[in-house]
Image (tube, helix red, strand yellow):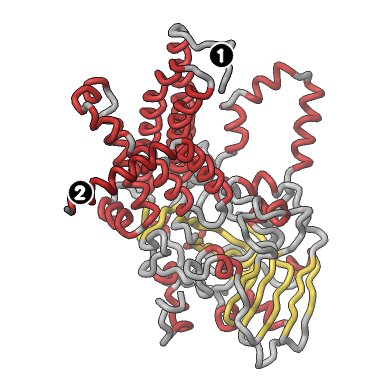
Amino acid sequence: MLINVPKASAVKESEITDEKVFNQRRDILKSMGFVGASALLTSQSAQASFFSDDDKKTFKTRALDYAPAAKQQQSQAFTPEEKIITHNNFYEFGTAKSDPVENAQQFKVNPWSLSVEGLAEKPFTLNYDELFSQFPLEERIYRMRCVEAWSMVVPWIGFSLAALIKKAKPLSSAKYVAFETLYDPKQMPGQKNRFAGGGIEYPYVEGLRLDEAMHPLTLLSVGLYGKTLPAQNGAPIRLVVPWKYGFKSIKSITRIRLTDKRPPTTWNILAASEYGFYANVNPEISHPRWSQASERRISSAGLFSRNRIDTKMFNGYDEVASLYQGMDLRKNF
Amino acid sequence: MAKTPSFKLTKAHVPWLKLGIHLGALLPLLITYYQAFNDQLGGDPVTALIHFTGLGAFKLLLLSLLITPLARQFKQGLLINVRRLLGLYSFSYAFAHLASYVLFDLQLDWSLLLSEIVKRPYITVGFVAWIILFCLTLTSNKKAQRNLGQRWQKLHNWVYLAVGLVALHFLWSVKSDVIEPLIYILLTLSLLLYRRGKLKRWVKNRINNTQISKK
């Protein structure tokens, strides 16, 4: 029998965000009168084809088989799914938070190829189906803290990055892990030009120290809320490192490379004084332009909800502190 | 020289123009707040509100500064009648901007507000611009204009500093996508460039004044 004892850092019931999940898109349409107006203007058959067209264009997700998170974590409510899938930083699909859900609906993830390579005895490649079948999937409920001082609680589905790396049998010379997002300007408008992509050099790259990558909390996610990932959340596979700022959790990964040198990372390249390699959540070290001492938890509770909460060291995941013993976290921010 | 215009703005047009400005400024504001209160403004309505009101204040301020060049270029002196209204709406948006930030983002954490104003350059310049616009709003009525006499124009010249600070506030607030702020900075600079003579005189007078006082 599996007994789940929640860690001190596990998401608690008291952190409740909201339970209300609603179909916002249809509500907006209704409130603007579009549905009513179009019903008056078009015949029934025209409407039917209009809506089926609409459905064809949306990115499809499907239910996943996975081991649910422990009961204690299940009983609490997460950030509403509608918020998680409409509020995204994914500059490949535009720089506004609402851009990715708009622009990523046609994104093709099957076929996919994720290569695990570099300083390893047994490099390998996973195709789309293997992303879901090679490792047992489990649910993990993590807090996600963005460097912009907002946060969410997300029920991810995935497997430990450690399991994937072990399979490749890293050489003893491997010290770091480098990640790379798909580079496909045809599908990703943000990669086409500097205007649409926020001045970032693509492909987006990220990196971890090998011991950070091997930590049991570090997750490769293939789904959320019981289903495969929506395109705008980084389908088909993304990284989730819950004690680091969100930008470390690279999306739509095609390449994972073991290396002996610290790999370059996208936001660090763009503004080294503002975004470090480590990017551990740390309330004491401000971003040069705003405080990191507190954060706003995204919810549906309305404008007057008191959802500003204190930010915790390592986003509350104290079990990772030993990874950074003896390091000056002010220098290595 | 511009030709005599075929269309001339008359006194009868002015109320309609003002009505248009009232509707154009108020309706988007009301709709946006309605959407925010009903959670129809995307994933994070708070940030959406702050961005909408901030950008709105900036646009209205630029519009108010566009009035004089337009009136001169097209010889429509009566256009000046709507300048104050645009300025007042600019401050209304700026007021909503700061209020949304304090109420919904910082959630009345006054000590955080103070430390952010002091520590964060983009908030410092934004706050200074807000104070300037506030002072201009307070002295925007006819009575204040009469009481202040010559000093009124000097006070209201501070709008040029305010618009520059607003542009800087926008540029420094973004993470990496500087294209949009740069477009606004270009618009700001061209409106200031139009007034280069006036600004030069203003700066010269300031320098002269300080030299005189030093002697």
Q: Is residue A28 visible?
A: yes
Q: Chain of mark 2?
A: B
Count of numbered tags: 2
Which amino acid, by three-letter code, is at mark 1? Thr
Q: Position of residue B69 (x, y in %)?
A: 48, 28
Q: Position of residue B94 (x, y in %)?
A: 38, 37
Quadrant including the N terminus of chain A: bottom right
User: Where is mark 1, residue-wise?
Assistant: B4
Say which residue appears at 43% left-offset and 15% top-offset: B78
Say which residue appears at 56% left-offset and 44% top-offset: B183
The alpha-carbon separation of the residues under discs 1 and 2 comes to 45 Å
Q: Chain of mark 1?
A: B
Which amino acid, by three-letter code, is at mark 2? Ile
Q: Earlier in the sequence, mark 1 or mark 2?
A: 1
Q: Position of residue B46 (x, y in %)?
A: 44, 44
Q: Is residue A158 visible?
A: no
Quadrant including the C terminus of chain A: bottom left
Q: Are marks 1 and 2 in contact (CB under 8 Å)?
A: no
Nearest to viewer (mark 1 / mark 2): 2
Q: Position of residue A81 (x, y in %)?
A: 57, 49
User: Where is mark 2, residue-wise?
Assistant: B212
Side of B69 where B158 appears, left or right: left
Residue at the extreme top: B12
